[in-house]
Amino acid sequence: MTPTSEQTEQSTKAQPKKQAPDSEQGNISLLPNNSLHTVSNLPTPPSIFGFRSYLRNFYDSTVPGNSNNNRNTNPSLNSSGNEKPKLDEMCLQWCLQKDTHRNEGKEPDCRMFCLRRKKVKEKQVFVNGESSESDGGSRDENSNPEEKDGVDQKTSREHPYHRSRWNFLDGYHLAYFKGAETCQSHTEEMKDSTQHTPSNNTNPLAQDQDQDQAQSSKNRTPQKTTKEYEIDLGEKFENTKTATRRVITRAFTPGYELAKRYVESWNDGTQTAFFTRFYESVQRLDAVYLVQDNIKRAFDEWVRGGGDGNSGFGGGVIEEVKRKAAYQAVDHHITNSVRLIGIGSGSTIEYVVERLLQRGKEANANFVFIPTSFQSRHLIVHNGLTLGDVDQYPEIDVTIDGADEVDENLNAIKGGGGCHLREKVVAEAAKKFIIVADYRKNSKTLGEKWKQGIPIEVISFAHTRVIAELKKLGCENPTLRMAKAKAGPVITDNGNLVIDAYFGLVNSPGELLRKIKLLTGVVEVGLFVDMTDVVYFGNADGSVSEKKRSLSGVVE
Ligand SMILES: O=C(CO)[C@H](O)[C@H](O)COP(=O)(O)O
């Protein structure tokens, strides 16, 4: 809404009732202090981005309409050499009136915004940490010339209106007046120079009182002006600055530290070293070999069914061949001619029981199953098979068990599950001892594949002594087997401990067996020498190999 100069003059000079326009549109006045001017003579209003420089020029602007302005070489002086009047207050007033209100004789609704620049002496300035009154020009010369508490004192001394270079709003106040009489009253006040030297009191209401007192003392008779509010723009902006500084500091300090360290790392050569290593690595095709190795490992894992034979990508080439070997052993040896069956321990044995169960309850009704461990007893009982005991049946028909390694003579290492004592008892009790295993256990010589060591069950009391003696026998590092999901050692079904003793390739398993077994405290050794009658190996290609002992040796 752009007011005309006629409207502006009406709003400032005439009484509100008389100046009301015919319509509901209001009047707008822009009122620089020290003289009353029309809108058309005012400086060009600022754009949003030019507002700061506009404010800076506010004081320096000579009053619009001075025809001598352009002729002066010194812009601050007029043709007479006197200082030109300066713009230190600018007001915007508008009035609204309704035709109904006018008919009723009511005053128009008038408002007024004033942007005003106050001198430095109107505020308190902090010098060397102490509060003192600033006079804008006679400040203590010994005071710190640096900016104190957001106040640029150097600037303050040079310019009575501007105290902070940073805070471009410093010294500016915004006042809001409401009501036709109040607006008119303030317009009158603008003629009074005493209105621009209020006390240090920053409370707007108190300032009003000060102003009133100052006016009274000069025996003037201005109407009392009641501001709705007055804002010290500089102070508000100063607070904003502090808050902004705090937020920025908090937000950016960690990032700054990181960035600093990063830059420093370039300087101290860390980054250079990294990229050099990276470049060399690329040249060596490390990444290619890494991918290749991982693919190979993944494939092996899939083929093996995982390190423990139970997991892995395929889950089970290994498991499948173990199953095949077990099924074949059952099919070949658990016939109607047998009744007492020893059930070994381990994961492969589970497929033995699985195959038996496939025959149905009735087919298994005549069999008695002798367990070799807590695990196999559980398998028998929970699958509804008839449980027997080696005490009842010291001689049994056939025992089927797994193994950790089987050599070309069908000698075996057993005890990977710590059950070899009972396994050996039940194996020896059987007329036929059958081993089922996968191809990983098939070796020429014991110790070739199973490098965990020969399991030796010992009584707890003697285990340190046995370890010492095993070293004398040539085992470099006999190890007490520790539990994985329990603190401390593995305790066998018999309450004993297990020592794993790796002797390298065991060319004479019978001899080694005897030496170890003679050690005091040893309960049983996981070397099964000359005991196995038949071995079923599940091969990698899915086939099953059968190895038998005969009078003429082992035959396939
Ligand atoms: O001797 C054994 C337990 O003491 C097992 O039969 C041997 O460890 C083989 O186990 P798996 O069939 O799980 O490979």
Image: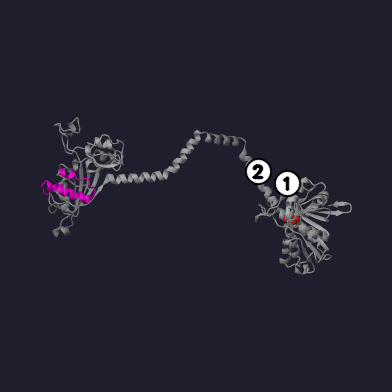
x, y percent for residue 292: 65, 42
x, y percent for residue 96: 19, 54
x, y percent for residue 471: 76, 46
User: Looking at the image, in which quadrant does ligand 1 appear?
Assistant: bottom right
- Examine the rendering and report whether any part of residue 123 can be seen: yes
Q: Is residue 268 above or below residue 173?
A: above
Q: From the Cβ of disc 1, is ligand 1 less than 8 Å away?
A: no
Give whichever of 474, 154 is nearer the camera: 474
Q: In the image, is residue 205 part of the stretch drawn in magenta?
A: yes
Q: Comparing marks 2 and 1, which lies closer to the viewer?
A: 1
x, y percent for residue 181: 15, 53
Q: Which one is earlier in the sequence, the residue at label 2 or at label 1?
A: 2
Q: Which residue is mark 1?
A: 477
Q: Is residue 80 above or below residue 40?
A: above
- Crowding near pointer 1: few (<14 within 10 Å), some, many (20+)? some
Q: Which residues are magenta?
A: 193-221
Give whichever of 480, 283 is nearer the camera: 480
Q: Amino acid at mark 1?
A: Asn
Q: Which residue is mark 2?
A: 293
